[in-house]
Image: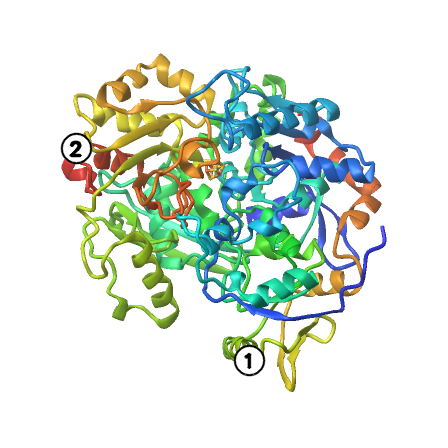
């Protein structure tokens, strides 16, 4: 399987503030009632964007900026700490990716969300607390400037600003080498898998 | 060299090192349910792949099943479509399905232990973040995403990096009216909702030695709420006794060898942990959440935190939480009016939970202002409870007695909060909107505290209500 090398992701940026934003907020459970991921994009952050009365609420995802990202199918979401915590639903990164976000910049990411995004070829990079605050402020003040996430050089840049970024080494290697979906490597190991299975009593039926 | 259980299980299941430095880890047991598996089967078909070891994947249906409607087709066509998709997928690929008509269906994290599929020294994965529940048996068990479900189906392996291990020791007896649920809520409160990121939690100490397997499951279940992808307790005689005789337990001929093998996986004396934290069990009191993350919790007789007492980051979340919960900082949570009471979920929907509450519920009545439902986590639990006459005690007290499933834990079925109703819940998540209404409010607590709330119509101290 050949996959695109994700070395740099560039696009307009949208700041979605707040820490501990859980996957229930990103995609409410009722939208998990489906047998495909198609169409999830339009429901990202649904209950934050629409009030119980069905009216739009002020939320970054309702902004013109979000609309431009959705149209371009390319963009960077700037988030806080522990983003994507809670339920393991892959529907969360799927919905944001289908909406148009192709990279995340934040303070920290919940592990399952991080893994699920990486497997979609969507990098989640982290900045230091101070840098994140600066990046967040810059993005709000300069909505027309592209934010660039360089996964190879581990740097986030916008205009003349740049901040050094981090990402788990294995995720970075996978992204830049076009191996972010591990299935090809896993299938390659089939013989070794059978050998391991044979060594485990409970697997062979004891 | 002395090793932790985590290290031993990891080594025994390591297939090889992947080119990117991660480990290809063998997943001995794979559990699936209707919500996170259909897309994975779809990807498998798209890639023209087969299920590599169909006998090592087990399926059940839990999230979408209505608990007040047992006949199909369900009135909800999407629920019907999802259950049928799972039937077709398990049939097409030769996977055992604990379907609704078998008497064994239930929440996936209850079915594994009940069937004896969950065993010490094994690796378990499931497309569900509460998979850590199975760690109560000394398994390394964790939640995975849908694409990883595909990986396990196709290869029986995952690409992973090892976790660090934090030993969490709780020692001493718990006071009357304090339960495993209070222990884990307290741990999360102290260590934080992201304190466990990058770690497996090893729960130990005399409190855990004395816990039943069901109590250990309650704690391991909520490891993810503390940020830890998996949590476990070292296996001991109680573990072996629990498994013995279950349908998928080793046969009598293999039993002694299995026990010896299981024992060999327990953490060695003198092994090195990345981190150790200790708690005094006697100091833990009944705990309730007041906010919108499981870490926002207080003892029932404490005041909720004043905003000034919090650091800047916590304060922002707290302000949001108080607004959503319609609660005031620096006041007591005790006395807050409750609209709905939910007893169930993979955290506290087991037979021991139902028994404990029933013991105190006899002769008491649910407040007329409260809607109270009890949802056994599995059909086997429901059957056992009915056999013991527990259903009658609940019904007499004014609870609705339901069929098995996840129900109001996440409200993917028709059980939902309405408007800003406040729910006293024995489940594990109090996120905004979690129980089916955007403005709905959740207060997490132990099953007995839920019962006390049902009777008084308030968040209250079960120890006083039931003279525990
Ligand atoms: S009971 Fe709740 S937490 Fe447990 S599996 Fe079901 S929805 Fe998830």
Q: Secondary structure at mark 1?
A: helix
Q: Position of residue B196 (x, y in %)?
A: 48, 56
Label 1: how many Cα within 10 Å (few below 14, some 14–19, many 20+): some
Residue under the point 58% across and 36% down = B35
Q: Which residue is mark 1?
A: A138
Which quadrant is home to the C terminus of chain B?
top left
The residue lying at 17 percent from left, 35 percent from top is B456
Is the residue indicated by label 1 positioned so its CB lies within 8 Å of ligand 1? no
Disc ID at residue B466? 2
Vertical placement of B40 versus B269: above or below?
above
Image quadrant in which you'd find residue A149: bottom right
Q: Is residue B40 above or below residue A59?
A: above
Query: Residue B174's quadrant in the figure?
Result: top left
Which of B165/B286 is in front? B286
Whole-percent x and y of residue B84? 63, 24
Q: Relative to B145, is A17 on the left or the right?
A: left
Dot 1 and dot 2 within a common chain: no
Above/below status of B30 relative to A182: above
State whether residue B311 is above or below residue B176: below
Percent of width and height locating residue B412? 48, 35
> Does residue A44 show up?
yes
Q: Nearer the viewer, residue B55 or B174?
A: B55
Q: CA distance from mark 1 to mark 2?
A: 57 Å
Residue in the picture at 32% in, 23% down: B400
Question: Do the residues bearing badges 1 and 2 touch, measured as CB atoms within 8 Å?
Answer: no
Chain ID, mark 2: B
The residue lying at 39 percent from left, 39 percent from top is B427
Q: Tag 2: Cα neighbours inside 10 Å, few (<14), some, or many (≥20)?
A: some
Q: Chain of mark 1?
A: A
């Amino acid at each position: 399987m050949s996959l695109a090398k994700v070395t740099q992701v560039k696009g307009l940026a949208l700041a979605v503030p707040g820490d501990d934003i859980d996957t229930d907020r990103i995609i409410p459970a009722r939208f998990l009632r489906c047998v495909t991921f198609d169409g999830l994009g339009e429901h990202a952050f649904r209950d934050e964007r629409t009030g119980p009365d069905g009216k739009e609420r002020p939320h970054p995802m309702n902004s013109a900026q979000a609309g431009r990202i959705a149209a371009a199918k390319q963009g960077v979401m700037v988030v806080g700490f522990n983003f994507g915590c809670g339920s393991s639903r892959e529907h969360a990164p799927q919905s944001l990716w289908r909406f148009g976000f192709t990279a995340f910049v934040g303070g920290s990411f919940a592990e399952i969300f991080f893994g699920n995004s990486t497997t979609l070829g969507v990098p989640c990079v982290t900045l230091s607390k101070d840098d994140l605050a600066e990046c967040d402020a810059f993005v709000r003040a300069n909505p027309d400037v592209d934010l660039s996430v360089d996964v190879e050089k581990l740097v986030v840049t916008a205009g003349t600003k740049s901040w050094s970024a981090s990402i788990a080494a294995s995720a970075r290697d996978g992204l830049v080498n076009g191996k972010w979906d591990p299935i090809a490597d896993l299938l390659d190991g089939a013989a070794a898998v059978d050998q391991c299975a044979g060594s485990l009593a409970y697997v062979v039926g004891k | 060299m002395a090793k932790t259980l985590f290290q031993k299980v990891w080594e025994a299941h390591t297939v090889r090192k992947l080119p990117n430095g991660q480990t290809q880890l063998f997943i001995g047991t794979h559990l699936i349910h209707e919500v996170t598996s259909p897309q994975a089967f779809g990807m498998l078909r798209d890639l023209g792949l087969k299920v590599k070891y169909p006998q090592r994947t087990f399926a059940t249906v839990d999230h979408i099943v209505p608990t007040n409607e047992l006949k199909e087709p369900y009135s909800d066509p999407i629920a019907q479509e999802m259950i049928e998709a799972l039937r077709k997928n398990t049939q097409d690929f030769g996977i055992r399905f604990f379907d609704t008509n078998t008497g064994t269906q239930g929440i996936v994290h209850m079915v594994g232990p009940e069937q004896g599929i969950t065993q010490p020294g094994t690796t378990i994965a499931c497309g569900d973040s509460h998979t850590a529940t199975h760690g109560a048996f000394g398994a390394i068990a964790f939640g995975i995403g849908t694409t990883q479900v595909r990986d396990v189906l196709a290869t029986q392996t995952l690409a992973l990096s090892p976790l660090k291990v934090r030993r969490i020791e709780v020692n001493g007896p718990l006071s009357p009216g304090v339960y495993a649920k209070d222990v884990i809520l307290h741990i999360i409160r102290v260590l934080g909702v992201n304190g466990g990121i990058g770690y497996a939690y090893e729960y130990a100490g005399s409190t855990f030695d004395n816990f039943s397997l069901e109590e250990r499951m309650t704690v391991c279940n909520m490891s993810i709420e503390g940020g830890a992808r998996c949590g476990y307790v070292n296996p001991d005689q109680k573990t072996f006794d629990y498994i013995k005789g279950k349908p998928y337990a080793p046969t009598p001929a293999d039993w002694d060898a299995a026990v010896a093998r299981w024992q060999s996986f327990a953490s060695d004396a003198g092994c090195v942990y990345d981190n150790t934290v200790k708690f005094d069990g006697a100091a833990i009191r009944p705990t309730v959440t007041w906010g919108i993350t499981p870490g926002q919790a207080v003892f029932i007789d404490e005041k909720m935190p004043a905003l000034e007492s919090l650091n800047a980051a916590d304060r922002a979340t707290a302000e949001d939480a108080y607004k959503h919960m319609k609660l005031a900082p620096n006041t007591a949570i005790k006395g807050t009016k409750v609209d709905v009471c939910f007893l169930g979920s993979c955290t506290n929907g087991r037979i021991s939970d139902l028994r404990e509450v029933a013991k105190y519920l006899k002769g008491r009545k649910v407040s007329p202002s409260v809607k109270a439902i009890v949802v056994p986590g599995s059909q086997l639990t429901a059957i056992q409870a009915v056999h013991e006459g527990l259903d009658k005690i609940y019904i007499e007290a004014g609870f609705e007695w339901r069929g098995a499933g996840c129900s109001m834990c996440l409200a993917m079925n028709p059980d939902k909060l309405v408007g800003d109703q406040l729910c006293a819940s024995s489940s594990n998540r109090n996120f905004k909107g979690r129980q089916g209404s955007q403005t709905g409010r959740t207060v997490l607590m132990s099953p007995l505290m839920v019962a006390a709330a049902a009777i008084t119509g308030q968040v209250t101290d079960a120890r006083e209500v039931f003279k525990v």
